[in-house]
Image (spheres, grey):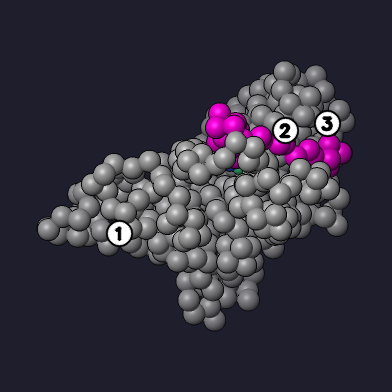
Amino acid sequence: MTDFNVAWARAQFPARAQEVNGHPAVFFDGPGGTQVPERVIAAMCDYLVHSNANTHGAFSTSRRSDEIIAGAHAAIADLLGCDADEVVFGPNMTTLAFALSHALARELRAGDEAVVTRLDHDANVAPWQALAERGAVVRAVDIRVEDCTLDMEDLARQINPRTRLVAVGYASNAVGTINDVAEAVRLAHAVGAMAFIDAVHYAPHGSIDVRALDCDFLACSPYKFFGPHTGVLYGKREHLARLRPYKVRPALEELPGRWETGTQNHEGLAGVRAAVDYLAELGRLCSPAATTRRAALVAAYEAIRRYERGLIQPLIAGLLEIPGLTFYGIRDPARFDQRTPTVAIRLAGHTPRELADFFGTRGIFTWDGNYYALNLTERLGVESTGGLLRIGLVHYNTAEEVERLLGALRELTLT
Ligand SMILES: Cc1ncc(COP(=O)(O)O)c(C=O)c1O
């Protein structure tokens, strides 16, 4: 396996040509949505020019649409390690989670329980809290504030024989913590509960194997891993077939159609497939021996993880040297394999919005606020004072860009 070719990867992303006030744009906003490679844009345009139609018709554009949609299911199946009919597309992860919540509510009994966490994005909290309207008890697992990790002992405590669903994030979109999701699934299954994994933040950084994890559901959002604005829900076939989603009567009962309400974002699905193929090509460049797309994707993520690890180190070391800076999350280099390159800070004397504004004028795109990880910003006591500033890297970022951000911060704290 060769090293990751960052110049090749960067050249794929046309958005990188943008400038702000004469500064080349630095996209540290990946956890809110990544940029897309040229081939994704081309696939979406091509769909609209040559294949634009609704599905299951007796003419060429409709038949091509059917093929493109099937291709997107097959691509995500390779990405997640499942079968194509276990992949459900929708407008975004949040909508899919609410759809699943509606279906779960139909089989819940009063006194059933669900477990959520204080680390998660609200899209992995609110849909399950809504089950309380059907009499379910919803419990929240605490975090260890000192390093923003999930309190696994509390997770074990909150799960009991009445638990029907355990909802845990694969990685935190706010502070980058990667959770022990295999253990969460194991604890859920030990009491006969289902496990739902929100992999939205993890998907651009690490490979996912739903069979090895044995999770019951897993969701991700292609727009966070170099694709267009769409959402994905994986479900074990037995659950997708048993549960009753809300659907219109003429829609097919077969999988995954019964979960894909209405007309999908076909051009988006063409782009999803192209995004997966981009990652697979990156993998083949690093590991030419990868024969299947799945093997190439696993190789891509291995290379991406190694490369990103090399960015986390200087980023966190540099941040920790800034006077007045508070760092939230894992900072010990020996534990960097338990985090993504997404970090959260505050700086004395500046609100997160002021910091984001300051960076923004220098062409450095960061996020401020709670990024919908509301349980976490409340738990950390920062919600009423502007939340956090998030610096989120992906594999198209570089050490030079990290240095630009650190240089700007030094300039700010010296003036
Ligand atoms: C960890 C996490 N989960 C869920 C979501 C919601 O995803 P979507 O915008 O596809 O509904 C996000 C979006 O920021 C996220 O970061």
Question: What residue is pinned by disc 3?
Answer: 325
* Disc 1 CB within 8 Å of nearest ligand 1 atom: no
Check if mark 3's residue and mark 1's residue have beta carbons within 8 Å: no
Viewer-nearest of labels 3 and 2? 2
Return the x and y of residue 370 as percentages of the image width and height.
65, 29
Residue 68, numbered label: 1
Return the x and y of residue 237 as percentages of the image width and height.
46, 61
* Disc 3 CB within 8 Å of nearest ligand 1 atom: no
**Residue 93 visible here:** no
Which residue is located at x 30 percent, y 59 percent? 68
Q: Is residue 234 above or below residue 302?
A: above
What are the residue bounds of the magenta stretch? 122-148
Question: Is disc 2 placed on a helix, strand or loop?
Answer: helix
Q: Earlier in the sequence, mark 3 or mark 1?
A: 1
Which residue is located at x 31 percent, y 54 percent? 253
Structural crowding at the residue carrying mark 1, measured as other residues with C-alpha within 10 Å and reported as few (<14), some (14–19) or many (≥20): many
Viewer-nearest residue: 100 or 121? 100
Check if mark 3's residue and mark 2's residue have beta carbons within 8 Å: no
Q: Amino acid at mark 2?
A: Leu
Q: Quadrant of residue 24?
A: top right
In the image: residue 318, left or right of residue 360: right
Structural crowding at the residue carrying mark 3, measured as other residues with C-alpha within 10 Å and reported as few (<14), some (14–19) or many (≥20): some
- Let me know if residue 147 is in the magenta part: yes
Residue 376, numbered label: 2
Q: Is residue 241 above or below residue 408?
A: below
- Let me know if residue 373 is in the magenta part: no
Return the x and y of residue 191 as percentages of the image width and height.
70, 54
Q: Amino acid at mark 1?
A: Ile
Viewer-nearest residue: 238 or 202? 238
Counting the numbered discs, the total is: 3
Return the x and y of residue 341 as percentages of the image width and height.
69, 49
In the image: residue 332, left or right of residue 122: right
